[in-house]
Amino acid sequence: MKKFLLMAVVLMTQTARSEDQMEQGKAVYMQLCVACHQPTGMGLPPVFPPLTQTEYVTGSPERFAAMILKGVMGPITVKGQPYSNVMPPQEAMLTDEKIAAAITYVRGSFGNTSPAVAPSVVAAARAKFVEKKTMWSEAELKAWPEGDAPAAK
Ligand code: HEC
């Protein structure tokens, strides 16, 4: 059992997009994100922003995870268009595995080609920001260390 767990952890921390993770991520996306960001990932500007090659999608995986966990409070500019809405936090609803899958799905769909994200990244973000009670502001997100850097392999 222990050996199996260890193997699972090793497998899950690899950044290649597995079919399973993409499939699980699509299911989460279609259940949760789709109402706002649409099946195409194009969003509904000027209310819901697109997920197509935005700095938040292709940038820091930790930041992406933190946004899903805690939510985002506008105003925020995405691809030159201002949004002043709210993205609700999902930390109480979604497991690390489901959030990682949804992020991986988004980063591998809608014209995005960024590497997969492991559940351990989400778990670390959850632990790091456990005390944070507010949604992220644009200023906080912009100040993210290495925020727009592509994911480390
Ligand atoms: C209730 C609507 C809603 C849901 C559900 C929602 N979002 Fe969002 N999302 C928003 C809004 C609105 C913003 C822009 C922030 C603002 O205006 O406060 C945003 C911003 C974002 C951003 C950063 C900006 C960008 O476009 O790159 C990402 C990435 C993102 N959402 C991904 C997701 C993912 C993945 C899910 C599902 C797990 C999800 N969202 C669920 C409404 C939503």
Image (tube, rainbow, N blue to C red):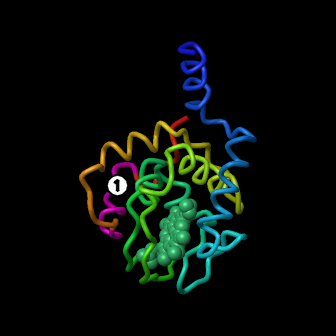
The residue positioned farthest toward the bottom in the image shown: 46
Q: Quadrant of the N terminus?
A: top right
Q: Is residue 88 above or below residue 10?
A: below
Q: Looking at the picture, how far across and down is residue 102, in whole percent? A: 60, 53
Q: Is residue 50 above or below residue 59?
A: below
Residue 139 falls inside the magenta stretch = yes
Q: Looking at the picture, how far across and down is residue 104, in whole percent? A: 61, 49
Q: Is residue 78 visible?
A: no
Residue 34 falls inside the magenta stretch = no
Q: Is residue 150 left or right of residue 137?
A: right
Amino acid type assigned to the residue bearing label 1 in the image: Trp
Q: Which residue is mark 1?
A: 144
Q: Residue at x 73, y 49 (%)?
A: 23
Q: Which residues are magenta?
A: 137-146
Q: Looking at the picture, how far across and down is residue 9, in whole percent? A: 55, 26
Q: Is residue 46 visible?
A: yes
Q: Is residue 117 left or right of residue 23?
A: left
Between 80 and 52, which is closer to the camera in this rendering?
52
The residue positioned farthest toward the top in the image shown: 3
Q: Residue at x 43, y 48 (%)?
A: 62
Q: How many marks?
A: 1
Q: Is mark 1 within 8 Å of ligand 1?
A: no
Q: Is residue 118 above or below residue 30?
A: above
Q: Looking at the picture, how far across and down is residue 69, in whole percent? A: 42, 56
